[in-house]
Image (cartoon, rainbow, N blue to C red):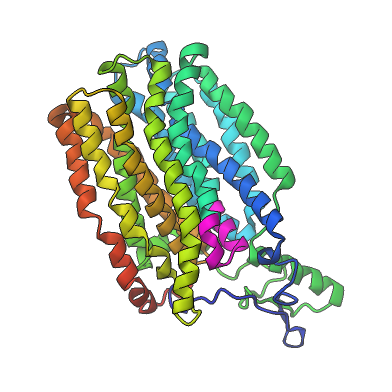
């Protein structure tokens, strides 16, 4: 079937032909038919956990100087890796968690990964040296990556395309706000209670939320739910020939895929390499994400050295980003699904995933503004409020671009939403982990003004890219057969 052309429908039961499907379009067992309050509760549950993981990625950044002092670290690379090592875990975890969530279910994978995340936060708090801290940060990143990828699958499981904009805005709030609030709160914790308590706070909050997920979360993966139903009907009706509508080639009694586990585990890479949609979208977002983390590397240092702020209040400099993120989320949540409904109506009530990208050029125009505004206001040492305000346009634009493209990929591959999301998480996390390593040298050579202007020119040249996806995405998508 052509890439992205898989129909987003409810396959119905046909026992005469041995097919097990949904009992009807309104089958209450189908997650798409869950009551709206239940859908919102499940999304809130996943979104809350998803907030903690990105929050953990940056909460340690203000406290790293105290860890360096305690462990007598003189290498800036080691200090940086103790922060960005978490993002390297984001590169590794999705390779396993996303395909496994598509094979065995979202709930069990998310619960296991959350427990992994909490356990190794304890390791971070008790780390005896900087090397151990880097390793434990990497492992917590592995566990924390599951919510970033399975959450996209949950959105696809619960909502039809016309409702995914609002759902995605709720889900991604934590992904975007978490890294901003991390340094803000981390500075106070590290200076007042010590850097070890940064991780003890994550243990307490993350552990509590993990228990709530284990208790209240429900399985939403259509394939897994139908496999369970098939196995139940085989036993009840004594008909071993029955097979799931989602797994027509399955032949073994346990209901596992005929394809090997290894083949399933490479699905994120397969989509990244073979999909004409996932690769360019992932590359574009990874570039923006790298620019974001390069920007992050300067904020605390700038406000401590240029403006004389203490560690605990330096995190307040991220408030401009926070305001931009929240404003962007509100605009996207209110506008996205309404625009989709109108475009679908104009298209003879036929939905095309590219409709999701109609607002991207608007959001993309805001992104370069911050680099010029923030960079030169810092370079010229203007009043501290000027660079803080200057960070807001980037955050506003980033929200719209991120949500639009993330939802677009889910719309293209709803059944493999977790793997497609994983491919994007891997590329952007790799860029976010490695690019900041070049930040100190770049800013030392170019200064904050021209250093950030360089990023501004890069993002300025990238403004037309989302419109290319919008104009040619459907044509390209229809011309490729991925044999999923």
Which of these two is toward me, 255 or 315?
315
Res 358 quadrant in image: bottom left
Whether residue 254 sits left or right of residue 392 in the image: it is right
Which residue is pictured at 52% across the width and 35% down the height? 140
Residue 399: % across, % down: 41, 48
- One can see residue 145 in this view: yes
Give the extent of the magenta segment.
150-166
Residue 78: % across, % down: 34, 25
Magenta: main secondary structure: helix
Which residue is pictured at 33% across the width and 74% down the height? 476
Residue 188: % across, % down: 48, 18
Q: Please tell me whether residue 99 belongs to the stretch shown in magenta.
A: no
Residue 297: % across, % down: 31, 30
Whether residue 231 sits left or right of residue 248 in the image: it is right
Whether residue 181 sits left or right of residue 245 in the image: it is left
- One can see residue 195 in this view: no
Q: Is residue 91 above or below residue 193?
A: below
């Amino acid at each position: 079937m052509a890439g992205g052309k898989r129909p987003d429908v409810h396959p119905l039961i046909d026992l005469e032909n041995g097919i097990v499907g949904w009992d009807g379009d309104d089958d209450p067992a189908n997650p798409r038919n869950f009551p709206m309050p239940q859908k919102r509760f499940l999304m809130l549950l996943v979104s809350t956990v998803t907030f903690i993981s990105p929050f953990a990625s940056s909460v340690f950044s203000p406290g790293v100087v105290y860890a360096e002092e305690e462990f007598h670290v003189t290498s800036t690379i080691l200090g940086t890796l103790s922060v960005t090592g978490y993002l390297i875990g984001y590169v590794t975890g999705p390779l396993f968690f996303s395909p496994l969530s598509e094979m065995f279910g979202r709930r069990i994978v998310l619960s296991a990964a959350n427990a992994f995340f909490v356990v190794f936060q304890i390791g971070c708090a008790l780390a005896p040296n900087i090397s151990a801290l880097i390793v434990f940060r990497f492992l917590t990143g592995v566990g924390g990556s599951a919510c970033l990828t399975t959450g996209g699958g949950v959105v696809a499981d619960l909502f039809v395309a016309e409702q995914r904009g609002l759902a995605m805005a709720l889900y991604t709030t934590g992904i975007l706000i978490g890294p901003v609030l991390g340094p803000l709160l981390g500075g106070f914790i590290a200076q007042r209670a010590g850097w070890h308590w940064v991780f003890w706070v994550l243990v307490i909050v993350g552990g509590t939320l993990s228990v709530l997920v284990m208790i209240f979360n429900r399985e939403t993966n259509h394939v897994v739910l139908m496999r369970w139903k098939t196995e139940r009907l085989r036993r009840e009706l004594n008909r071993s020939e029955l097979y799931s509508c989602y797994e027509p080639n399955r032949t073994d009694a346990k209901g596992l895929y005929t394809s090997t586990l290894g083949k399933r585990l490479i699905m994120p890479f397969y989509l990244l390499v073979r999909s004409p949609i996932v690769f360019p979208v992932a590359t574009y977002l990874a570039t923006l994400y790298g620019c974001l983390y390069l920007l992050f590397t300067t904020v605390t240092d700038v406000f401590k050295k240029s403006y004389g702020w203490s560690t605990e209040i330096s995190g307040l400099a991220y408030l401009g980003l926070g305001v931009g993120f929240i404003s962007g989320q509100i605009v996207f949540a209110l506008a996205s699904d309404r625009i989709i409904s109108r475009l679908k109506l104009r298209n003879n009530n036929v939905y095309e995933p590219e409709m999701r990208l109609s607002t991207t050029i608007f959001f993309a125009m805001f992104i370069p503004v911050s680099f010029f505004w923030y960079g030169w206001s810092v370079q010229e040492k203007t009043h501290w409020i000027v660079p803080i305000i200057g960070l807001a346009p980037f955050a506003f634009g980033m929200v719209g671009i991120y949500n639009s493209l993330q939802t677009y990929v889910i719309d293209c591959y709803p059944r493999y939403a977790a793997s497609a999301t994983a491919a994007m998480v891997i590329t952007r996390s790799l860029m976010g982990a490695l690019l900041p390593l070049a930040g100190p040298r770049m800013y030392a050579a170019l200064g904050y003004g021209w250093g950030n202007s360089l990023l501004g020119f890069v993002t300025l040249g990238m403004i037309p890219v989302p419109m290319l996806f919008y104009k040619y995405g459907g044509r390209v998508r229809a011309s490729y057969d991925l044999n999923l």
